[in-house]
Amino acid sequence: MAMGIIEGGEIMWIYQKSLQHPVKVSYPDLKFAKTVITQYGGPDGELGASLRYLNQRYSMPTGQAKALLTDIGTEE
């Protein structure tokens, strides 16, 4: 669990790493993969948002903030 602490020692946010829906892949499905890529691609799609989160993590000042952006980008 990561906790964001601001000056004065107050907790600003609490983050617990967990998946919303567990995923189990039993076999590769090329047709479904093409559909998913179509839905997620583009500058305003989920992939674009994910890459923005993953790029922004490099400018974060603390390890906890970097971990949070990594997890959000991965989840996107």
Image (cartoon, rainbow, N blue to C red):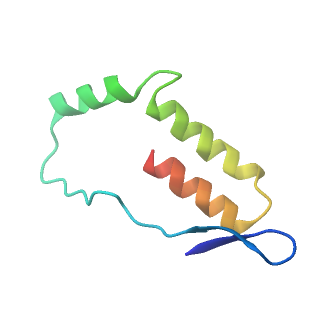
Residue drawn at (24%, 33%) of the image: 33
Q: Is residue 8 above or below residue 42?
A: below
Image quarter of the C terminus: top left
Residue occupying the far right of the picture? 8
**Rendered-image quadrant of the N terminus:** bottom right
Quarter of the image for residue 63 reads bottom right
The structure residue drawn at horizontal position 51% and vertical position 24%, both measured from the top left corner, is 44
Q: Where is residue 13 in the image (x, y as percent from the top left)?
A: 64, 66
In the figure, residue 64 lies in which quadrant?
bottom right
Is 2 situated left or right of 42 in this image? right
User: Measured along the vertical axis of the image, is residue 48 above or below residue 73?
Assistant: above
Q: Going 52% across and 48% down the picture, which residue do you hit? A: 73
At a point 46% along the width and 27% down the height, the residue shown is 45
Frontmost residue, 43 versus 6: 6
Between residue 40 and residue 21, name the one nearer to us: 21
Q: In this view, does 50 lie above or below 24?
A: above
Residue 28 in percent (x, y) is at 16, 43
Q: x and y percent of residue 37 in the render?
A: 33, 28
Front-lying residue, 7 or 27: 7
Which sits in the foreground, 68 or 27?
68
The picture quadrant where one finds residue 60 is: bottom right
